[in-house]
Image (cartoon, rainbow, N blue to C red):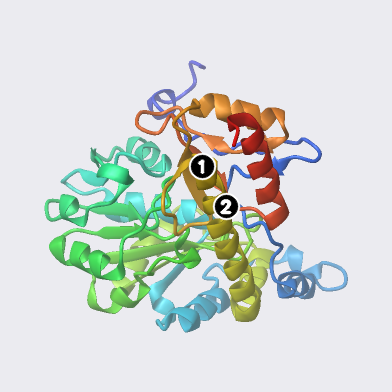
Amino acid sequence: MSRFWSAIVADLSPYVPGEQPKIAGLVKLNTNENPYPPSPAVAEAIRGELGADGEALRLYPDPQSAALCAAIARREGLAPEQVFVGNGSDEVLAFAFQGLLAQPRPLRFPDVTYSFYPTWCRLYGIGFETVPLADGFALRVDDYAGGGPVILPNPNAPTGRAITRAEVARLASANADWPVVIDEAYVEFGADTAAPLVASHPNLLVVRTLSKSHALAGLRVGYALGQAPLVEALVRLKDSFNSYPLDRLAQAGAAAALRDEAWFARSRDAVIASRGQLSGDLAALGFEVLPSLANFVFARHPAHDGAALARALRERGIVVRHFAKPRIDQWLRITVGTPPQCATLVAAAREIVGG
């Protein structure tokens, strides 16, 4: 701590991102990256944007990311003014917290969820209440009916469990006087998107990322879908903070990724197939595995401590995510890797737990 720190900095408990270890040969299943490379069209678009001599890099990017917003709007069946883009969905969510969710009543979200939510609340001075998940870590929409703003991840992280589009519609209607944000970082892997509800719910903001679904974690591209007044709030904040959140290469690469629907479908289907295989293999070893609609599974073994399992896997060159937090300290969040990566994990787990 320094005497030059502001009170805001001194009181923060920063979010802790997943480890990015630099160990050769590691099977990295801890941060939910897509196990497959992005569409070849992404690199081609980036090379085209650079040009032969990189001349374009001396110029600022489009501050409105108009071409990318148009590409997202076409994909989602919306108007460009209903789309906001930012530097990863974390930046988009941070703007949503400050611009929409800072309300006179406390913000509500699950007690087991994305751990950035309480960090943003403390950073922006937002009162919040956590709502306990039901048995099996299920989300109960009725627990959030009326009373104030809400943010829900769908599917939830780190559990992977999801609610239906009809339940999101019920949630938005039950909180019609308050903003409702649905964080869809993992929705492309089998859950219902709430995007079609935007037209009929002026309080609904849907937030997405290309990090997982389109294998662009390294480009940092996120976006939000909502009626124009909600999007305008995010734009006003962006232009009061950083008018150029997405560089030229990210804009070009992201737009190209969205155009290649065939690559997206193949990659998504491969991840879903591996998720089913991994869940079954772990269950056969005695693990309890939650039903997941994300690109990860959440699992525990009744006879083995969660932290000890994570350490034992790491000793075998496999990194998974363990959270030393109430209710989930016996669980592991395991990213769905390629079939060989998943097979390596299962073999190591078999060695550790027997069976």
Q: Rate crowding at label 2 as few (under 14), some (14 to 19) or many (20 or more) other CA atoms within 10 Å.
A: many
Judge from the rendering whether residue 257 lies leftward or rightward of residue 305; answer left or right: right
Per the image, the residue denoted by label 2 is 278
Tag 2 secondary structure: helix
Tag 1 secondary structure: strand
The answer to whether residue 87 of the structure is visible from this angle is no
Q: Which of 131 and 289 is in front in this view?
A: 289
Please provide percent x and percent y for residue 225: 39, 70
Q: Which of 2 and 305 is in front in this view?
A: 305
User: Which of the 4 quarters of the picture holds residue 134?
Assistant: top left
**Residue at x 29%, y 49% (from the top left corner):** 138
| Most distant residue in the front direction | 355
**Residue at x 19%, y 66% (from the top left corner):** 170
Per the image, the residue denoted by label 1 is 333
Please provide percent x and percent y for residue 101: 28, 51
Judge from the rendering whether residue 8 lies leftward or rightward of residue 337; answer left or right: left
As shown in the figure, which amino acid type bears the numbered disc 2? Leu
The quarter of the rendered structure image containing the C terminus is top right
Q: Is residue 69 above or below residue 241?
A: below
Q: Is residue 224 above or below residue 103?
A: below
Q: Count how many numbered circles sit on residues in the image.
A: 2
User: Which of the 4 quarters of the picture holds residue 127?
Assistant: top left
As shown in the figure, which amino acid type bears the numbered disc 1? Arg
Judge from the rendering whether residue 30 lies leftward or rightward of residue 82; answer left or right: right
**Residue at x 78%, y 69% (from the top left corner):** 50
**Residue at x 57%, y 52% (from the top left corner):** 278
